[in-house]
Amino acid sequence: IWLDLPIEPQLDISRLSIEADRVHDGEVGGTPYTGAGVKVAVVDTGLAPDHPRLPVPTAANQKNFACRDGRDATDWCECGNAQGHGTSVVGIAFTQPDECCAGGDCPSWCGGDCVDNCDALLGIACGATLVMAKVVHEVPNIFQCFSCMRICATCPPGDYYAPTWVLIVEALSWAATLPAAAGPNADVVTSSLSAPSYSLYEHTTANHITSLNVDWVVHAGGAPLSQASGNSGANQLRAPSGAFNVISVGNYDNNNTPSRTDDMIVGGSSGGPTKDGRRKPDLCAPGQGTITTVFCWTWPSVVFAVFSGTSAAAPHVGGTLALLKEARPSMSPRQCHAVLVNSAAPLGSQAPWEGQPGWGQLMAYNAVLWRNRTADALLSAPSDSKTFQLAPVPPLDEVVVTIVWHRAMQNETEPIEDDTGNPSPANLELFLERRLSGGAWSVSESDVAANPNDGKPEDNARQVRDAQQDQSLPQYEYRVRVEYNPTIDVPYAGSQSFTLASRHALVTNP
């Protein structure tokens, strides 16, 4: 039995910083991707449904989990002191092109005014289909509603649920549409919410209820989940971003420039590792001082506002996942997870993984460009291994290969177990090997269990890197080896599926 505790929002658009503009403009294979045909679910406080730059979800793609009478999104009145969070989050992924800036005749309500740079203020997945799940209700502030010119249809007095972790789980499960459930069957889910009393560093362990719940949602629902890491600073990761199967997102400041040379991690971005020593967050995205839609808008002056936080970073990842899914619709959550981590760019001079930036900065262009460079495989038992050859690596190219595996769940609180009752996931180890033509293979880099006897679970994402030699020198051949090596901490001996993602093509089992 777990105490059901309250939730709260955490908060921020920066297409150029993650090079999503290049994806929109068709620089990947000549095809522009905007997330068309992909359903992206936002689990949050709702949105301003009449905002001129936001889409309106259909009746089938909206649900209010806060009102006991189950009313839909058109009743989500964001006029309270803590509301507006959802509108800001939605804007990062979904802000539509400005009709007042488009060619031809302007709608009459534009008054002939062009109020912003249309290309700059555009959602990462502006072509995607919006799914909204509201989990926070607040009694409207009548003075704020008046200043926003809102007419609020609210839940009957006292007829709403207090915002708790259970509502988040219900909303996530509905959005991803678990087997035998009714829902919108979203392709991607993004959440910037956490429960204050369930989001402490101590609650980021693998077997905390939040980790188990969201691992089940991803495993059973089949939709990748982008989750804000929190805004508590270094070594203060917040649940549920400690779960194995989520893509945990930190926050970096792009200093209002598209160049990565002046980017820096935000001090308040919650960093890992988890309380039980696993490497989370997975990566970081822009979320500091970026512009997005505002719920209290008045045309033509206040349509956008500046917000900051990991809540702003997470929908950048959610939008990028939509671009991936449009470009390669069959991608599984594990493949998405591996590709995003493998395509991330180091933040400055960071080590391969660091507590606040994770494996590096989100790079939408690279992710979509390298989306097909994956290999899935199954290791059936301990001591099993598989080898993958890399295609020829050009001179001075950096070799980067990432492995990701997920926890298999039998229900929302219980992982799949092996014959002796040990729970999924397994411990896999990654080796990058190289050789000169005709020579012997040798390990150039490995990522293995740092301490197999420290009483803590192992990571479920590993990465290896190397650099090909200058063209004036002999060129290396590369291969990757994955080994199934249980540790005392992770004795699981059942079969384990995994995904490899590489920046160069992979050949399975040469």
Image (spheres, rainbow, N blue to C red):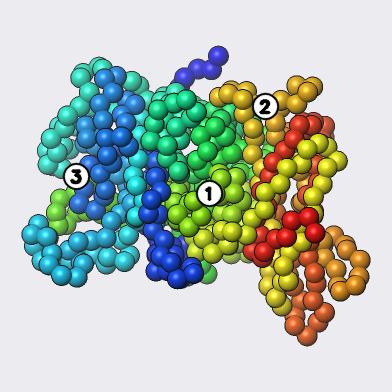
Q: Is residue 484 left or right of residue 504?
A: right
User: Pointer 2: residues within 10 angstroms few (<14), some, or many (20+)?
Assistant: some
Task: Specify the quadrant that holds the N terminus.
Answer: top right
Q: Is residue 415 left or right of residue 241?
A: right
The percent coordinates of residue 474 (x first, y second) are 82, 79
Q: Read off the residue under disc 2.
A: 416
Q: Secondary structure at mark 3?
A: loop
Q: Read off the residue under disc 1.
A: 330
Q: CA distance from mark 2 to mark 1?
A: 24 Å
Mark closer to the chain start, 1 or 3: 3
Task: Give the image quarter of residue 57.
Answer: top left
Q: Secondary structure at mark 2?
A: loop
Q: Amino acid at mark 1?
A: Ser
Q: Read off the residue under disc 3.
A: 50
User: Is there CB contact under 8 Å for labels 2 and 1?
Assistant: no
Is residue 75 or residue 4 the one in the foreground? 75
Is residue 302 or residue 385 the one in the foreground? 385
Q: CA distance from mark 1 to mark 3?
A: 34 Å
The percent coordinates of residue 134 (x first, y second) are 33, 32
Mark 2 or 1: the one toward you: 1
Q: Amino acid at mark 2?
A: Ile
Q: CA distance from mark 3 to mark 2?
A: 45 Å
The percent coordinates of residue 201 (x first, y second) are 58, 34
User: Is there CB contact under 8 Å for labels 3 and 2?
Assistant: no
The percent coordinates of residue 376 (x first, y second) are 67, 49
- Can I make out residue 448 in this image? no
Farthest residue in the bottom direction?
472
Farthest residue in the top direction?
1
User: Pointer 1: residues within 10 angstroms few (<14), some, or many (20+)?
Assistant: few
